[in-house]
Image (tube, rainbow, N blue to C red):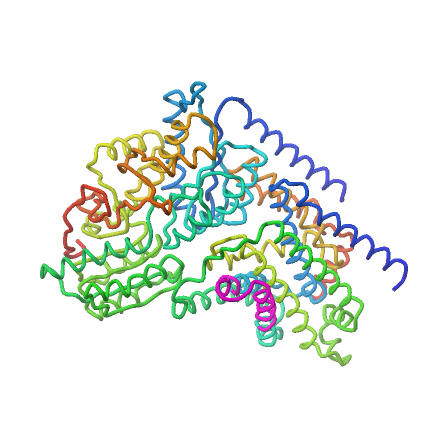
Amino acid sequence: MKRRLILKLAGAMLAGSVAFSGAALAADVIKFGAVAPKTGPLAGGAVVTHWPNIKLWAAQINARGGLKLKDGQRKIEIIEYDDQTNPGETIKAVQRLVTQDKVDFLIGPYGTGFNLAVAPVFAKYGYPLIAMTAITDQIPDLAKKFPGMFFTLGSTTPIVQGVADILSELVADGKIGNKIAMVNVADAFGIELANAARPIFKAAGLDVVYDKSYPLGTQDLSPIVKGAKAASPDAFIAWSYPPDTFGLTGQAMVQGLDVKVFYTAVATSFPAYGGKFGSAANNVMGTGGVNPDDPAIKAYMKAHKEITGLDADFWASSSVYSSLQILEQAIEGVGEVDRAKVTEYIKNNSFKTILGDITFDENNNNVNFWTVGQWQDGVYQGVKAVGRDGAKEVRLKSGWK
Amino acid sequence: MNNKDWRNLGLAALGLAIAACLPLSGNGYYLTIGVTIAMYTVLATSWALFSGPTHYISLATAAFYGLGTYVVAMGIDDVPYVILLVIALGVGAIAAGLVGLATLRLSGVYFVIFTLGLAEMTRQVVTWIQSNWGGHQGNYVLTDITEEMIYWQLLAVAACVYLVGWLIGRSRLGFALKIIGNDEVVAAHSGINTARSKVILFMVSGMVAALVGAILAPRWTYIEPSMAFSPMLSFQVVIMALLGGVNRLWGPLVGVIPFTLLWEAVSISFPNQTLLLMGVAFLLIVYAIPHGFVGLIEKYNARFRGDG
C-alpha cells in the first residue's frame, strides 16, 4: 500500500516538475510573476479587474515587439498562479516565483489584505511592489517600512471626503436635506470607511439619522433597508462589498427607498451592475470612477474588450492597467532588468498613463484619483476626483424605474 | 522508560534537529513550504490528540486559530509579542473549555455540525466587537519577525505537542480517553469522569490551535476575519490527520508532508485547475489507500464503524 502511494506521489511530482520546466524556457524573454485569485471568495472581483488587464498588457507589449531595453527589444512572459484567495498560498506562490521560476519582476496581487501580506516578501527579495488594488489609510507607515511599495488606487479618507463634499454641496444648494442613512458591511473595509465617515460627515454638517452595520455574507438585507427607510433620510450611503452592493440595491428597488442620493461602494462601477439593474441604476453613485469620454480611456476600454472579450470596470481596472504602464515605463526608462534601479525610477519620475500623469509623493502614494462615480444614462461617469479633470455634474436620484 | 522509549526519543530529537536546519539552506521557497508543513503538523497532531482516541470529529480548529490570530492583531501595538502568545494560549484554553463544557455531551454528527458553526460564530462575534469598540482597526501586524523565526517557533511548539501527546498516552487520562472512544457508557460505569477528560483534551487542542494562529499572525501582516477564520483550515487539518492516521502520535505528520507536497505540485503545474485536481487526488487517495498511512487504521476504522 505504502509503496504504491509513494510511487504515485513521485509520479505526480515528476509530472509537475516537467510541466513546470517546460513553461520556463526561452532565455531572453523578461519574466513577470502574477499571483491572484482564480478561485475562492475574491475570484469574482479578480477575474473582472485583475487578470484581464495583465493579459491585455502583455499582449500589447508583445505585439509591439517587447520592452525596449539598452540591448534591444525583449518580449515578456507572464507566469500565473492561483492563490485560491488564501494569503498563505499567495506568499508561497511569490516565494516560488522568485526562487524557483526566477522571474524578473512581480505584479502586485489582488485586494488590500493580499498586497499587505506579500509586502515583506517583495521587500526581502528587493522587488518593487505596485499595490494597484489596495485602499488603506496606513500608507505612510507602510511606505516607511517597505520603501519599494507604491500605492495607486487611493486611501480611505479622500474617498469618504469625496462623498461628504458632494452631499454638503447638495445641502448648501438646497437640493436635499441633511439627513443621512449610513450602513456598512462589518468587515475591514466597511468598518474603516464607516469610522472615517462619522467625524467627516459631522464636520460637513450632515446629520446621520441611521447608522447600522451588517455581517459580511448577510443574505437578507431587507431589515437594513427597512430600517433606513423608517428614518426617512435624504441620502443613503452604504460602505458595501460586491454581494451586498447588489443586495442593497435590489432591496431598495423592492421597498421603493425614496432618496435623492443612493450610494453603494465596491462593485457599483462593475459593468455587471449597470447590466443587472438597467435604468433603475440610473443616478446611483459608487466608489471610484473614470472619465469615459477621455480618449485614452476610450481606447483602453476598446482594446480591453477586443483582446480579453470582457468589459473593463469603471474604476479599478484602469488603475490596474495604469500600474502596469508605470512598471513598463520604469523598466524601459532604466533600460535593463535591474530591480533596485527600477524602484528608484518609479520613485523619482512621472508616468503617462491612461488615467493621466501619475507621480508618487514622499509616501510612495498616488494622491490623484477618482473618488466618486455615478451611473448616468447607462455609463458610469466620474463625478468627484482629487487632481483629475473631467468630472461630470452630480445628478439627483429620482425613483427606481 | 525502557530502551525503546529512549530510542524513539532519540529519533524524534534527531528529526527535530534536522528540521531546524532548514532555514540554513537559504532558500525562501523551501522555508515557506517548511512553515506550511510545520503549521499543519502542529494543528493536525493536536487535533488528533483529542479526536483520535475519542472519535469526536472537531471542525473548530479555525475558530481557535482565528482567536489566536486576533489576539496578536489587536494587541501588537501595545503589548509585547511574547505576552500576546501567552494570552493567546489562555484565550484558546478558556474558549475551548467553555465550548467543551457546553457541547461535549453532544455526540456524533451533532458535535461535528456544532464545531463547524462555532468557527463562523466566533468570526461574527470578533467582527461585531471590532466594529463596535474597535475604533481603529487592529488589523495591521507590522513587526520585524522573520519567516525563520516563525518556523523555529512552530518547531518548538511541535516538540511540545509531541511531548505532551506522549505523556498523555502514558497517563491515566490517555487510558481513560481510549475507553471513552471505545464505549462511553462503559467508561462512565467504570468510574471515569468522561466529561472532565474530554474537556481537558479539547482544551489542549484548542490552546495549541490558538497559539499557532498567534505565531502566524505576523506572517500575514494584515488580518481580516475571513482569512483568520477560514473554514478551509478546519477541513484541511482533518483531511491531513485522517490521511496520515490518528492512532499514532506521528500519524498526522505522515499525512501532512505528502499532502502539502502534492498540493504544491498540483498548484505549480495546473494553476487554473488546482481545486479540481485536488478533488480528483482526494478520490484517488481514498480509493487507493482508504485506511490512511498508518497500517493500524484498518482496525481503527472497523471499530469506528462498529460504534458509529
Q: Is residue B87 magenta?
A: yes
Query: Is residue A85 left or right of A133 when viewed as pictured?
Result: right
Q: Nearer the viewer, residue B111 or B201?
A: B201
The structure residue drawn at horizontal position 35% and vertical position 63%, both measured from the top left corner, is A220
Q: Quadrant of residue A336?
A: top left
Can residue B308 be seen at all in this image of the molecule?
no
- Of all residues shown, which one is farthest toward the left? A174
In the rendering, at what x and y percent does residue B85 appear? 59, 64
For residue A70, above or below residue B161: above
Q: Nearer the viewer, residue A291 or B306?
A: A291
In the rendering, at what x and y percent does residue A134 appear? 39, 48
Provide the residue span drawn in magenta. Answer: B71-94
Screen quadrant of the N terminus of chain B: bottom right
Q: Quadrant of residue B308?
A: bottom right
Q: Nearer the viewer, residue A235 or A328?
A: A328
Query: Is residue A26 left or right of A284 when viewed as pictured?
Result: right
The structure residue drawn at horizontal position 75% and vertical position 58%, both measured from the top left corner, is B249
In the rendering, at what x and y percent does residue A222 appear? 30, 64
Q: Is residue A33 magenta?
A: no
Query: Is residue A181 left or right of B211 when viewed as pictured?
Result: left
- Of all residues shown, which one is farthest toward the right? B3
Can residue A230 be seen at all in this image of the molecule?
yes
In the rendering, at what x and y percent does residue A290 appear? 25, 42
| SS majority, magenta | helix
